[in-house]
Image (spheres, rainbow, N blue to C red):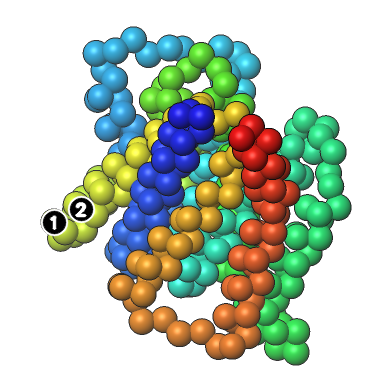
Amino acid sequence: MLKSVYSVIFMLFSTFCLSLSGLLCKLVSDEYSPESLTFVRYLIPIVILGGWMLKKHITWPSKSERRMLWIRGACMGAGQMCFMFALQHLSLVECVVLFSTGPLFIPIMERIAFKRLLRWGSIVTLLVTFVGVILLSGGISQFHWDWALGLGLAAGIFNAGSQVTLYQVSQTRLSSQEMSLWSFICAVIILAPMLMMLDSSNFNVVSLYESHSTLVLWALLGIGMLVVGTQLFRAKAYRLASSGSQLAPLIFTNLIFSAIWQLLWFDVSYTTQQALGLTVIVLANMARFVPTIKQQWQRRHALV
């Protein structure tokens, strides 16, 4: 019982850190290119975690663990790259809503990777989500595919891949810190050549610290620390959880926190159709977890 409570608490800490890092990324998105911001978002945590664990014995991952870490690193890097590009063109809440569609794609990921049964409910919620995206883009009569919305959805898909591999890696002998450190390293190794190809003329890690105010640099450091907190708390939560689906509904607390930050920091208004689209996407995501919540409720009452 205590394990279940602690897993929920750690997951809430994780989503709180995630929402704060999203806010800071939005605030500094005009200062840096999405490529540079994505790279630094993982480079700083490597320095923080590496320095913290310097005097400790760091476990070298086994072959099977390395495979999962590489997949997780690729999903983390690609997901954040898509998120950063979308963040420059969409509001914070829009980006977070699209990023939070990740759990909807988890059954598809598990079907591809582990040959698990794909339920009709998962397919229906995905279709409803795409209806919400159409409304968010202006409705059927004015529909035009917005690449920023597409990137936001892509971030959600890669988020699903990251969540699936996180649960798999969390069941290994690696500690939470080691899992996070190796995941960040894999993400940076995968991102580095990609970023140099995309922006070879402007990309320079040293230039990130030049010609910027101290406040912006502190924001970058804050993003790095929050990323570390997000991963450590989430890894700890998954380690204590009985299954990944037990914690999946709590991922949406990130949306609640982000909505609060947007109200406090940004002056953003939506049309009726856009607000309806956001609502449809959120409801589709929440419906995905109704069976899980029902099972947990029945299980608890059966024990009483």
Q: Which mark is residue 90?
A: none
Q: Nearer the viewer, residue 150 or 195?
A: 150
Q: Label 1 sits on what residue type?
A: Thr
**x%, y% of residue 188?**
44, 36
Residue that badge 2 annotates: 217
Query: Compared to 154, does 164 lie above or below?
Result: above
**x%, y% of residue 181?**
40, 27
> SS class of the residue under badge 2?
helix
| Residues tagged 1 and 2 counted as in contact (Cβ below 8 A) | yes
Query: Compared to 199, does 130 lie above or below?
Result: below
Q: Is residue 182 left or right of residue 295?
A: left
Q: Label 2 sits on what residue type?
A: Leu
Q: Can residue 183 be seen from the camera position used here?
A: no
Residue at the spot 43% in from the left edge and 34% down from the top edge: 6
**x%, y% of residue 113?**
75, 33
Residue at the spot 46% in from the left edge and 36% down from the top edge: 5
Residue that badge 1 annotates: 214
Residue at the spot 51% in from the left edge and 43% down from the top edge: 77
Label 1 Cα neighbours within 10 Å, binned few <14 / some 14-19 / many ≥20: few
